[in-house]
Image: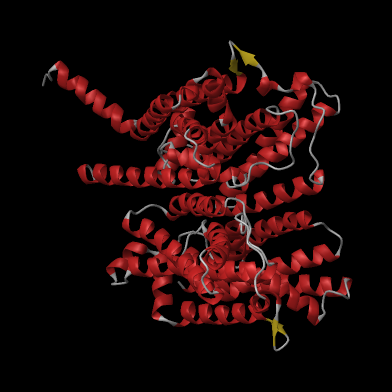
Amino acid sequence: MELPARSVKRDRLARLASAYGQELVVLGAVLVLMAVVGTVNHRFLSDTNLNSVFSGNAYIAVAAIGMSMVIITGNIDVSVGALIGVLATIAGTLATRGYPVWLAWGVPLVVGMAVNAAVGVLVAYARIPAIVVTLGVLSILRGGLISATGGKWITDLPPAFRAAQARLFGVPSPVYVAAVLTVLAALWMRYSSLGRAIYAVGGNAEAARAAGIRTRAMVVFVFAVHGFFAGIASVLFATQLQVIQSTVPPNLELSIITASVIGGVSILGGTGTVIGSTLAALLFSEIASALIFLNVSAYWLRAVLGLLILGTVLADMARRRRKGRLAP
Amino acid sequence: MKVDVRSLFRHETVLAILAVLTLAVLAHQHEAFFTADNLLNQGRLAAELGLVSLTMTFVIVTGGIDLSVGSILGLGAILVGVFWKNLGLPLPLAMVLTVLVGGLAGLGNGLIITRFRVPPLIATLATLALYRGLAEGISKSRSVRGYPEWFFRLGQGDVAGVPTQVWILAAAALLAAVVLGRTTFGRATYALGANETAARFSGVAVDRTKLLIYTGSGLASGLAAVIFVSRVSTTRSDMGTGLELDAVTAVVLGGTSIFGGRGTIVGTVLGLVLIQALRNGLALAGVKGDGTIVVIGAVLILAILVSNFVGREGDG
């Protein structure tokens, strides 16, 4: 049966809207907020402020790419904040001890992959739930970091090391890193067979196994990839300032998980994209900046973020339920 | 079901042996450890985490999780000061109101989870940010001090030679054990954790049970907040940060399955004893506070690993 062209087009639009529903919601929120706050206060749209909005949470966006993959397989990682702290300290220590810069940047990626591959083995082969393993790893890393550094900050970082402060065409480098990694990861997850397997494992592990996917190895692999992204995030985090503190922002792991979830990754596994999580990370830093420009006390930032998260989650559940009623 | 109960006992046995070993080694190494003074003081330090862990056991047995407990504690701590100093309410009323607000916050979690079918992890992740945000917004980094002397009897005083909050914790543990192990409500909790759909069809009031449990979790966090303020004599909006993960650690270490359906209060209490003994013992051995959480993390993973192996033998 031939369908009129217009209906096909509308159909395609509808499919796009339903496939990327949450991403579109978050993108809409980013744009609306930008327009509203920009109207109230023009300086919100100045180059300086936009640069800081876009680069401020770039490391969270990068970490959320790996986190999204982990959540899509139906697992979770609450230790990534502590891991980023440890990796940043490793990078800074190498840099200040005179090792070449590429080594200071590269070692965290390798260590991140190794640590999280071990987590993946415990999850997939020892069958310990991911939240339990990563709770334990969180304690180990956080405690280990503070006892190793004694809470001291790393100073005297060589200028060549501070990658996150570099600019290209006036735009801070973390923006490029986050954007490029997001696009590459999104394409890889959508079009490569390995990327599709991530969704298969999270959607229905039994079916994935029947289809010939080695689900356990896949979980280890995804955790390792997540560790790789955590490594990149830690380099961005470590090189954004003149010093590296021995602590990361409190609840960093929860911010990263929140970015994934608000971006549309279902905590039940099987669905979501990294485009959504990156947009969500951007939205968070935009809100933080908007509050300043709207003269709202910074003390209320987290309450506003909390309300926003809650609103998004409830809207998402309502949307899902509507969809569920159409096709149970 | 029988296998479940058996492997459950096995986990608690593993844990009890681990706890006794730890206590024995610590007592052997440090004369200061096995003194009544030190042990009671450890009970004092563990009371807030203990209260929250008891209700967290119920939450996790239902297959849920409550990540907002630390934030509710922070909000509660701020509210004690605000109700009393800024609103001029009598302190006893301020304390009661704080506990009630904690319950309200928990009820909020429960409503989001039951009415909107939001997975508990997500719901309480959102309220973790919201409640902590409210604490920060209300307090604006100002702390309230200067409480009357009698108030400190709760967190720093003794009753019959035992710290006040240890009595509260013991009573709460007993109550929790009876409710979870011996009442219809407890059976309903296990039933809905093991298989929610089956529980619903068997006539278990699933939503009401969950609402009560999350409200209870909030109440416990509010009570812990009052005790915390009384123990440290001041309020700050960052109090209780990370408490949620400590409580989950204690509960899971105690043998409660993170997937729901099984777990006991006895196990949680053993988990608490082990965690607090490790903290104290390592501190006595000169390991700094942060080194001890490394050990706790390692013990958590090892305990689950061992009991998994033991449990699987039982299944086979």
As rendered, which of B253 and B105 lies closer to the eye? B105
Q: Is residue B142 in view from this perspective? A: yes
Residue A271 in the figure: left or right of residue A144: left
Asked where in the image residue B62 lies, by quadrant, the reply is bottom left
Residue B115: give x, y in percent of width and height. Answer: 32, 57
Residue A139 against residue B158 in the figure, above or below: above
Of the pair B280 and A197, the residue shown nearer to us: B280
Query: Along the horizontal axis of the image, is B286 left or right of A313?
Result: right
A120 shown above or below B252:
above
**Chosen colour scheme:** secondary structure
Whether B2 is drawn above or below B118: the answer is below
Identify the residue shown where x is 66% and y is 23%: A164
A210 or A32: nearer the eye? Answer: A32
Q: Position of residue B314 (x, y in %)?
A: 57, 68
Q: Report the number of discs.
A: 0
- In the rendering, at what x and y percent does residue A315 appear? 33, 44
- Furthest residue to the bottom? B160
Quarter of the N terminus of chain A within the rendering: top left
Q: Is residue B306 left or right of residue A294?
A: right
Task: Please name whichever residue, B192 or B102, is drawn nearer the observer in this view of the structure.
Answer: B102
Q: Position of residue A185 (x, y in %)?
A: 50, 26
Residue name at image x 64 percent, y 76 percent: B151
Residue drawn at point x = 82 percent, y = 63 percent: B283
Evaluate whether residue B10 shows in this view: no
